[in-house]
Image (cartoon, grey):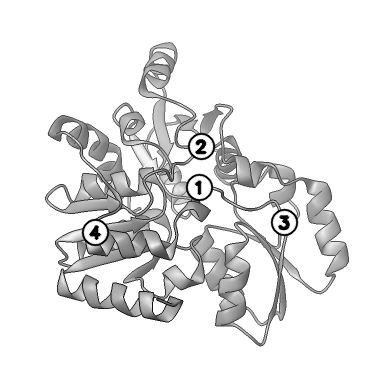
Amino acid sequence: MNLQEMQQEIIRLKREKNICILVHAYQSHDIWEVADFIGDSFGLTQQAAKSGADTIIMCGVLFMAETVKMLMPEKRVLLANGDAGCPMAEQMDSAMIAQMRKKMPDHKVVAYINTTAELKTVCDVCVTSSSAVKIIRAMPEQKILFIPDCNLGAWVKEQVPEKDITLLNGGCPTHARITAAEAKAAKAAHPEALLLVHPECRAEVTALADYAGSTTEIMKYAKESDAKEFIIGTETSIVQHLQLACPEKRFYALSKDLICKNMKLTTLGDVYDCVRGIGGREIEMDAETIAAARRPIDAMLAYGG
């Protein structure tokens, strides 16, 4: 079976079995081509809710599949590759944050959506990278404990100086490893290019950017911009996706180290096995956990996230 034949069989089986395939933007393009929806983690969940599918396959990482299950507990939810986790999501647990709540009882805990279901159960509000500024600005509370990504938190803090935001030392190891020196070198190598970065990058990298935003926002900006060259400061797969979407423009990776090993675990073969019913990790969650973990997500939606 060649690539095209496998893709065609996946598409046939997903239609036959009423399966919805969600593909995170960091997945490879051969997986993009069999997707029902492509995008950032929470946006995918919202799209899946409209699909009417019986089974949802998440081509991403564990916390994303958990979020789908929390919002659609009646659905069968599969993570295409069961080993695909997220180091940032797993950096903190509920016991640690429960202890912080005792020490800081006057703070509301705001959690990046990139957290486990277990951690969400002790948080007040969730945010995405695209909604964090809007939601924290809208919250009536003045004191915020932002977890887990201190780089995203620092970016939010700079834009919402009227709030007292406390950060903990956590974040995405892939984005955080990029240095200002690399960003400067990339700008020097491509002086006509705009630097577009994800706010999970360090503050000194984001400060050099022409634009900072979520992965979906970065792609939208590059597609709509009149500029012809771009340095992409997020997972390197986005360079290829943009090259295919905008062949008349030039795209360069900020660093060859901007590779998410967990995202790269998922293969087209994993998706094929899932639609055949012999692969993937089924997400199971008790009703109590679902109810507790949904509360901060519902709060995010109430604030317009």
* Between discs 2 and 4, the one toward the N terminus: 4
Task: Indicate the quadrant containing the N terminus: top left, top right, bottom left or bottom right.
Answer: bottom left
Q: Which residue shows up at 80% across the image and 52% down it?
A: 182
* Between discs 3 and 2, the one toward the N terminus: 2
* Between discs 1 and 2, the one toward the N terminus: 2
The spot of residue 49 in percent (x, y) is 21, 61
User: Which image quadrant is residue 242 in?
Assistant: bottom right
Q: Secondary structure at mark 1?
A: loop
Give the vertical position of 147 relative to 244 (above or below).
Answer: above
Q: From the image, tell me which residue sits under label 3.
A: 256
Q: Secondary structure at mark 4?
A: strand
Disc number at residue 56? 4
Q: From the image, tell me which residue sits under label 2.
A: 87
Say left or right for 109 vs 180: left
* Between discs 3 and 4, the one toward the N terminus: 4
Q: Amino acid at mark 1?
A: Asn
Q: CA distance from mark 1 to mark 4?
A: 19 Å
User: Which image quadrant is residue 219 in?
Assistant: bottom right
Q: From the image, tell me which residue sits under label 1.
A: 262
